[in-house]
Image (cartoon, helix red, strand yellow):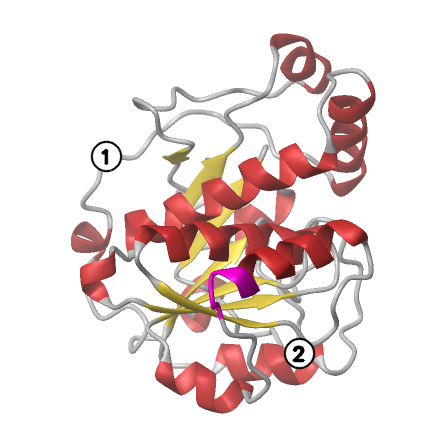
């Protein structure tokens, strides 16, 4: 009942069988809490030898592959990437760079830019590719073929504050399809969409979970992807994670969510 109420016919004009034309993985995947997700990232850097730059690069690459999977360039090259001030926004910046290299025409809305030197370097890389940073969001939403929601990730605790409450409302009412990164922005990581206000009717068509699904995925209805093809056995064993088989050289795998919210 909850899902059917949130799903708009204008955003899902095709039958389920058409939307899920690619083979999807069906297996039991454990969702990971925001606390464990933060701990896992810390382990990757302190024990696994990874840097934040590397993890963000792999996350952004996964996002870009998900975009290519659901919206190849011949479906429309104009992609709007909306970035938040933290690491989720950084993932969006990396994804935009890859999308530009794939032949898309990405543009960035980055209302509260992260102060970390890493984010400034990512911004410089995009500027060197002539990727525009835009301020007029309503016009950008109307002129783009797909929106990438890279505003908030697993660390979001709410409540929404400006300018993001207005941004979420604008995305929510957009006719363009949306791909959310790690979690639909405005959603509580455990409890799903807010009961009222901005985000209460936000159900993106596509979701890519990074490293592992978050508990809010049980409220999600749409095409769901997983990106995280870099975890070692020691990490997956420590957190009890199940790693699906990634096909070929893909950095993503599609994992369906059933009617009961199970992966």
Tell which residue pokes out farthest to the front in this image: 128
Residue at coordinates 38% horizontally, 51% vertically from top-left?
101
Q: Which residue is mark 1?
A: 23
The picture places residue 89, in percent across and down from the top left corner, at 65, 58
Up-down relation of residue 52 to residue 99 (above or below): above
The residue depicted at 47 percent of the width and 37 percent of the height is 226
- The dot on residue 80 is none
Mark closer to the chain start, 2 or 1: 1
Residue 168 drawn above or below residue 239: below
Whether residue 14 sits left or right of residue 257 in the image: it is left
- Per the image, label 2 sits on a secondary structure element best described as loop
> What number is the disc on residue 196?
2
Count of marks placed on residues: 2
Q: Main secondary structure of the magenta part?
A: loop
Where residue 36 appears, as percent x and y from the top left, is 77, 32
- Residue drawn at x 37%, y 77% is 144
The correct choice, above or below, for 194 with respect to 100 in the image is: below
The percent coordinates of residue 183 (x first, y second) are 59, 53
What is the span of residues highlighted in magenta in the rendered image?
Answer: 127-131
Query: Was residue 128 drawn as part of the magenta stretch in this picture?
Result: yes
> From where the camera sits, is residue 213 visible?
no
Residue 115 is covered by the magenta coloring: no
Q: CA distance from mark 2 to mark 1?
A: 35 Å
Indicate left or right for 192 with 39 as reference. Answer: left
Q: Quick check: can you spot residue 94?
A: yes
Residue at the spot 33% in from the left edge and 61% down from the top edge: 104
């Amino acid at each position: 009942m909850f899902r059917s109420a949130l799903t708009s016919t204008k955003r899902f004009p095709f039958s389920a069988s058409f939307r899920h034309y690619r083979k999807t993985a069906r297996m039991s995947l454990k969702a990971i809490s925001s606390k464990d997700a933060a701990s896992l990232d810390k382990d990757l850097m302190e024990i696994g030898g990874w840097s934040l730059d590397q993890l963000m690069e792999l996350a952004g690459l996964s996002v870009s592959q998900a975009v290519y999977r659901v919206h190849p360039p011949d479906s429309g090259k104009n992609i709007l990437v909306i970035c938040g001030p933290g690491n989720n926004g950084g993932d969006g910046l990396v994804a935009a760079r890859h999308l530009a290299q794939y032949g898309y025409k990405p543009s960035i809305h980055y209302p509260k830019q992260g102060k970390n030197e890493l984010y400034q370097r990512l911004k410089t890389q995009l500027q060197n590719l002539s990727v525009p940073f835009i301020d007029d969001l309503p016009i950008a939403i109307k002129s783009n073929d797909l929106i990438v929601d890279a505003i908030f990730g697993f660390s979001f605790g709410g409540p929404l504050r400006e300018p993001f409450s207005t941004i979420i409302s604008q995305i929510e009412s957009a006719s363009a399809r949306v791909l959310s990164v790690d979690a639909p922005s405005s959603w509580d990581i455990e409890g799903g969409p807010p009961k009222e206000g901005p985000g209460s009717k936000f159900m993106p068509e596509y979701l890519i979970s990074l490293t592992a699904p978050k508990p809010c995925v049980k409220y999600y209805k749409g095409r769901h992807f997983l990106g995280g093809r870099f975890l070692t056995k020691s990490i997956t064993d420590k957190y009890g994670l199940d790693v699906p088989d990634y096909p070929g050289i893909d950095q993503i795998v599609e994992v369906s969510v059933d009617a009961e919210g199970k992966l």
